[in-house]
Image (spheres, grey):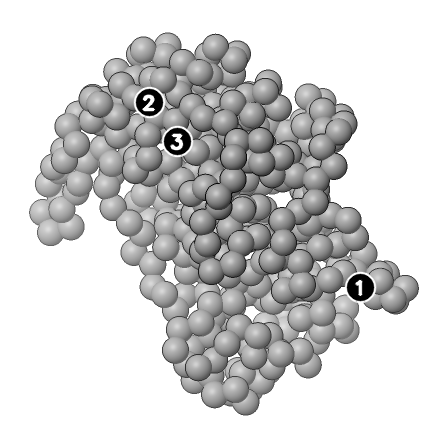
Amino acid sequence: MVTREATIEALQPLLEPTIKKSFVDLGLVRDVMLREQSVSLSIVLHPDSQGQTSILEQEITQLLSTIDVDNAHVRFRIMTEHEINDVLTKQQQSEQGKAPKPASETAAAPIKGHGAGLENHSILHPESGVEFIAIASGKGGVGKSTVTVNLAVALARQGKRVGLIDSDIYGFSVPDMMGIEERPEQIGDKIKPVERFGVKVISMGFFVEDNNPIVWRGPMLGKMLRNFFAEVEWGELDYILLDLPPGTGDVALDVHQMIPQSKEIIVTTPHATAAFVAARAGSMALRTNHEIIGVVENMSYFESKETGAREYVFGRGGGGRLAETLNTELLAQFPLGAPDNHPLEPDFSPSVYKADSDIGAEYLIFAQRVIDRCGK
């Protein structure tokens, strides 16, 4: 069976046309997905290389055929200004004999934390210009992480610079939901987050092997969360979204203490009990002076593909009542369902809706409402 390592090795000779260096060495081969004898991947190009995509696709197909890949699905994307700066930095480090360690050498161990002086870190400083939005719920199973990843992607599609922290350290799911198979790279003493759909992502899931459970007490959770701020090279961002664990436990409390300027969105289903429990998470936000910018009602209804008829599987009205209780707005209502994504698509992910899908369009509207509520 074709492996990710074999795929990367086969593409080693592929040169970026403008920079004249290997795409692999520059870290510009992204989102490698394997399905039997098929491979899908993304290639990040220098802006001056846009006219070379047809030639590159032929070269990629030829190189991958040497490891018995029958079908290669390639998606090209142009570098952002930040990525161009990263590439220049990598070249300088390489010329000085200080090339960054590959992800495979850095992903097995947790980040080493500094701890002290975190309040002065540029990302957390109130004058950094970064808008923090914590996504919370009273209980699990309401689709909080689905809402988080799709909001992050929708904000990026609106042209915003977005980071996403999977703060649910026990129940991390964001990498899998976004179809991420890469690991972060270590550059100097910093960790470079994985970028997917224009969103920079960091998660505990990158630092454990084989989906092993995390068996930690509360203080260790807070320490890891602090590392996500102090040890990660975020660059310039407009928003950082935090996918909180459900309920009002240690991590949620740490976030409220570390980021007093953070805003919050509460996710619930229409069910009365789910909304009742979600009110506790909202109450915690209010007690710690976090502004609740709105409520999202997920799984609001099920819509038949054949008839278009709606069935209100979990009842009706829970989101509206919760918003009224918390004196905020009901920002969005999303149906019960899953994206109709094909596993062989280059940008496949199990949980991210395409921008041109009906629900993807609803998430764009939701993202604009969040932008408006944040005053950005």
Residue type highlighted by circle 2: Ala
Q: Residues within 10 Å of mark 2 (few under 14, many from 20)?
A: many
Percent across and percent down for residue 216 are 52, 40
Please tell me which of labels 2 and 3 falls first in the chain. Answer: 3
The number of discs equals: 3
Instruction: Using the image, tell me which numbered label, if any, was put on residue 99.
Output: 1
Whether residue 66 can be seen here? yes
Q: Quadrant location of the C terminus?
A: top right
Q: What is the crowding at mark 1: few (fewer than 14 residues within 10 Å), some, or many (at least 20)?
A: some
Rounded to the nearest angstrom, the CA distance separating label 1 from label 2 is 47 Å
In the image, what residue type sits under mark 3?
A: Pro
Provide the residue designation for mark 2: 278
Q: Quadrant of residue 21?
A: bottom right
Q: How far apart are labels 2 and 3 at the CA level?
A: 9 Å
Disc 3 target residue? 246
x and y percentages locating residue 336 in the rendered image: 23, 41
In the rendered view of the protein, which quadrant contains the N terminus?
bottom left
The kind of secondary structure element at disc 2 is helix
Q: Are marks 2 and 3 in contact (CB under 8 Å)?
A: no
Nearer to the camera, 245 or 333: 245
